[in-house]
Image: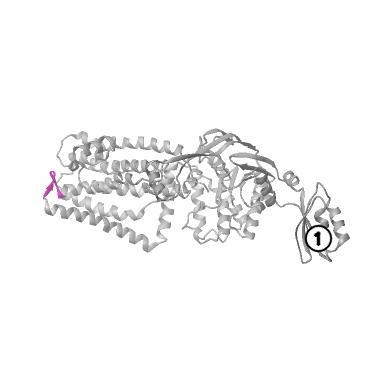
């Protein structure tokens, strides 16, 4: 963990070297996520509610997803660069160092610029928490906290699968973005609005709904099953098969000629 | 102690013919081809040895090195380095080895070199006192004093290579893999790097495995060479013996006054005249048939010798001969 801090500093130092770019990207990220926020506002200016969710309730959902995402991105976005790490041979370097490959990839590149999105979602979260009319008992706060933390773990699992796939093919990874970036875009709305089939898929196959939809229902008082509050930690089990998949891929690593 | 026996490794690569039509076809059905990168490699390297690992491009050099570093898992065969199997105990194994990839940097691009070194110290969990000592030593030997505070991106290639080598030695590895360490360096830097490697091998007893296309590196550094071609070890031998084997042919460059009758020379067995003009000639003789002094005698009878030099084969030519001999 201490070492992670060191990597953190050296990354920060590198990115600060290009000051203007650093701040511009933060600002850019902030503005970009504001625009998605605005699109949400426009839709709700036409329809008072969508499938029984009001604007403020959707905002809460959106903020949680964004927060979870920006956490995961900040720490684990190195996996996003993973295909290029493989093709430029950077990964060989990782392999000859006495630390776990996952740790090094996570530490390889940290996206501080994503902090912009993080702040934006933090503002939105605070606003939505106040506006959605939920009485924030201690247990509900705990569930909210779990949603964000476990959400980012589940998303990290997706990144891991994404990286693991690169061991087999370097092309056609775009479809994974449906789950990663798409997970964020669709995650604006509670997953139930997309229909039962999608919800089932996101419950049993890729358990994004476990940190988003179910606990949200509990938070909003639409369901009184306290069990729903415990689903996010269960969802994090998803990371185990992801990890196994990654290990399997790693074993088949081919490297590139030099 | 490094022991490698019967390593094999093959890669699957997709192939397609050129052209758009075939590109579309490849999209639907892809043809694969298996390339046997290594087909049964065995050798043994003792502690403290310095070995040159040579072979043409695509012979399997990198693949072997990558297996020995724990990056790749071979299809079959065994490899044990310092009592460990690289790909099975990767993290323990890599603590004992240092790797320099000549074409890829291991330093963080935007921060001063010293920061990279400190991060490496933490990655390898090197004690602070040991680190200080190693760093002082390396700084002095590689003359890094001025470079440590410069960001890597501002270093020249020669400076960077010195830093790279230092970086790979911070954890005092027992085995050092050098993959083309002098590629693209100027003469001065090349010599500095070679001197350092020699010194390190002699004084610290570091085992060095060197792959390079620069035969001067090999000549200056290694006693023993391993020649690999088409995935096999073709030759494992002592540099000097090899040279003797290939020094059958000697080159004599001569400057003279008078007229040299090249017919006379060419008719003599064991002599070929490669060039002859303006009072200079380059003669190659086969030392199995003629001695150098016989040729000189013959020359001095017909012309007035102004200058003469006799050369054996260079390592470069020897390797070309070797490649030819093994048809790789």
Task: Residue A50: say if magenta.
Answer: yes
Q: Which residue is mark 1?
A: B308
Crowdedness of circle 1 by 10 Å Cα count: few (<14), some, many (20+)?
some
Residue A54 location (% of width, % of height): 13, 47
Instruction: Give the camera-side residue of B231 and B73.
Output: B231
Residue A153 location (% of width, % of height): 32, 41
Residue A16 location (% of width, % of height): 40, 59
Q: Number of numbered discs present?
A: 1
State whether residue B141 is above or below residue B38. Answer: below
Look at 31% across and 49% down and name the residue there.
A70
Note whether residue B140 is visible: yes
Range drawn in magenta: A48-55
- Left or right? Give the position of B127 relative to A249: right
Residue B120 location (% of width, % of height): 50, 49
- Left or right? Give the position of A202 relative to B62: left
- Left or right? Give the position of A233 relative to B250: left
Instruction: Give the camera-side residue of B139 and B325.
Output: B325
- Left or right? Give the position of B168 relative to B299: left
Note whether residue B86 is visible: no
Name the image quarter holding residue A192: top left
């Amino acid at each position: 963990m201490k070492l992670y801090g060191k990597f953190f500093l050296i990354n920060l130092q590198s990115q600060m070297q290009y000051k203007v770019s650093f701040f511009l990207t933060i600002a850019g990220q902030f503005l970009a996520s504001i625009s998605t926020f605005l699109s949400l506002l426009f839709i709700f200016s036409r329809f008072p509610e969508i499938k029984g969710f009001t604007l403020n309730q959707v905002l809460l959902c959106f903020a949680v997803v964004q927060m979870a995402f920006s956490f995961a991105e900040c720490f684990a976005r190195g996996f996003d660069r993973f295909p290029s790490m493989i093709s430029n041979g950077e990964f060989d370097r990782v392999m000859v160092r006495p630390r776990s490959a996952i740790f090094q990839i996570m530490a390889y590149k940290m996206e501080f610029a994503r902090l912009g999105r993080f702040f934006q979602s933090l503002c939105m979260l605070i606003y939505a928490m106040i506006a959605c009319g939920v009485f924030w008992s201690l247990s509900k706060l705990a569930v909210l906290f779990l949603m964000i933390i476990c959400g980012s773990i589940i998303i990290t699992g997706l990144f891991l699968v994404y990286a693991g796939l690169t061991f087999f093919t370097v092309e056609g990874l775009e479809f994974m973005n449906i789950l990663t970036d798409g997970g964020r875009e669709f995650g604006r709305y509670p997953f139930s609005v997309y229909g039962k089939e999608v919800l089932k898929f996101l419950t049993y196959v890729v358990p994004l709904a476990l940190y988003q939809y179910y606990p949200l229902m509990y938070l909003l008082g639409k369901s009184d099953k306290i069990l729903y509050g415990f689903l996010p930690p269960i969802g994090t089990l998803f990371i185990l098969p992801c990890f196994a998949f990654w290990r399997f891929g790693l074993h088949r690593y081919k490297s590139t000629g030099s | 102690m490094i022991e490698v026996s019967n390593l094999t490794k093959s890669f699957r690569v997709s192939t397609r013919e050129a052209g758009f039509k075939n590109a579309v076809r490849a999209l639907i059905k892809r043809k694969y081809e298996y390339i046997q990168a290594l087909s049964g490699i065995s050798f043994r390297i003792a502690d403290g040895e310095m070995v040159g690992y040579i072979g043409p491009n695509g012979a399997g050099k990198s693949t072997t090195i990558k297996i020995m570093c724990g990056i790749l898992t071979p299809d079959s065969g065994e490899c044990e380095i310092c009592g460990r199997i690289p790909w099975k105990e990767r993290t323990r194994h890599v603590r004992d080895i240092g790797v320099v990839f000549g074409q890829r940097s291991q330093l963080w691009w935007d921060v001063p070199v010293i920061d990279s070194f400190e991060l490496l110290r933490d990655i390898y969990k090197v004690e602070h006192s040991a680190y200080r000592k190693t760093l002082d030593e390396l700084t002095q030997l590689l003359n890094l004093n001025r470079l440590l505070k410069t960001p890597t991106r501002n270093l020249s290639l020669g400076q960077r290579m010195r830093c790279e080598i230092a970086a790979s030695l911070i954890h005092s590895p027992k085995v050092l893999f050098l993959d083309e360490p002098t590629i693209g360096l100027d003469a001065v830097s090349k010599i500095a790097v070679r001197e350092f490697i020699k010194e390190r091998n002699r004084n610290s007893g570091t085992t060095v495995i060197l792959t390079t296309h620069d035969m001067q590196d090999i000549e200056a550094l290694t006693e023993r060479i391993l020649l690999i071609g088409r995935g096999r070890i073709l030759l494992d031998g002592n540099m000097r013996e090899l040279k003797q084997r290939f020094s059958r042919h000697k080159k004599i460059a001569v400057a003279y006054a008078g007229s040299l009758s090249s017919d006379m020379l060419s008719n003599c067995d064991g002599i070929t005249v490669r060039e002859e003009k303006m009072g200079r000639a380059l003669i190659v003789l086969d030392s199995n048939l003629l001695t150098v002094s016989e040729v000189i005698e013959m020359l001095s009878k017909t012309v007035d010798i102004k200058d003469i030099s006799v050369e054996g084969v260079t390592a470069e030519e020897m390797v070309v001969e070797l490649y030819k001999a093994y048809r790789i």
